[in-house]
Amino acid sequence: MIMIKLVYCITKKTGMTDEEFFRYWENIYGPVGARIPRLRRLVQSHRLTVPGDKYRPDYDGIAELWFDDVEALLAARQSPEWKASREDEANFNRPQQNCLHCLRGAHHLGRHEVK
């Protein structure tokens, strides 16, 4: 099986605090996205600001939407739930500042255990 993964790099809406953005994205938008049919997995990774790091992250978060195959992705994109999630994006992010990658599978290049 070839897993399809959409990866969105998300930029928060101008004027929102980090707290407002992360709270909305997780608690309001997250459940909307989770209802998309044929979605295998939805992952949100929230940006971490590292004190003392001189590099500002380019994005405020990353969303991963996993589908079993291309057919599942295409069916999901035709659903009312997909449309609802797209319409809600303007409430918390700047879609014109986001980037999207459509990826196939995963290539594990090493084994690392997290404790």
Image (cartoon, rainbow, N blue to C red):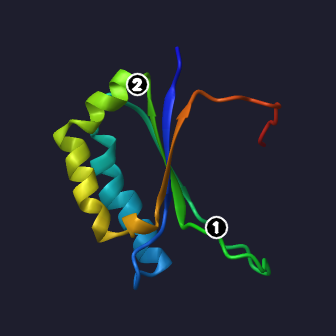
Residue 109: image x %, image y %? 80, 31
In depth, the one of 87 and 34 nearer the eye is 87
Depicted 97 relative to depicted 74: above or below: below
Depicted 100 relative to depicted 103: above or below: below
In depth, the one of 40 and 87 nearer the eye is 87
Under circle 1, the secondary element is loop
Task: Identify the residue under disc 2.
Answer: 70
Label 2 packing within 10 angstroms: few (<14), some (14-19), many (20+): some
Closer to us: mark 1 or mark 2?
2
Depicted 56 relative to depicted 47: above or below: below
Residue drawn where x is 49% and y is 76% of the image: 18
Q: Amino acid at mark 2?
A: Val
Task: Identify the residue under disc 1.
Answer: 48
Residue 14: image x %, image y %? 41, 81
Query: Is 69 positioned to the left or the right of 52 in the image?
Result: left
Query: Is 100 positioned to the left or the right of 49 in the image?
Result: left
Image quadrant in which the C terminus is located: top right
Residue 65 sits in which quadrant?
A: top left
Q: Is residue 45 visible?
A: yes
Depicted 56 relative to depicted 15: above or below: above
Under circle 2, the secondary element is helix
Residue drawn where x is 46% and y is 34% of the image: 66
Residue 110 sits in which quadrant?
A: top right
Q: Is residue 37 visible?
A: no
Q: Earlier in the sequence, mark 1 or mark 2?
A: 1
Residue 27: image x %, image y %? 35, 59
Outermost residue on the top side: it is: 1
Residue 86: image x %, image y %? 27, 54
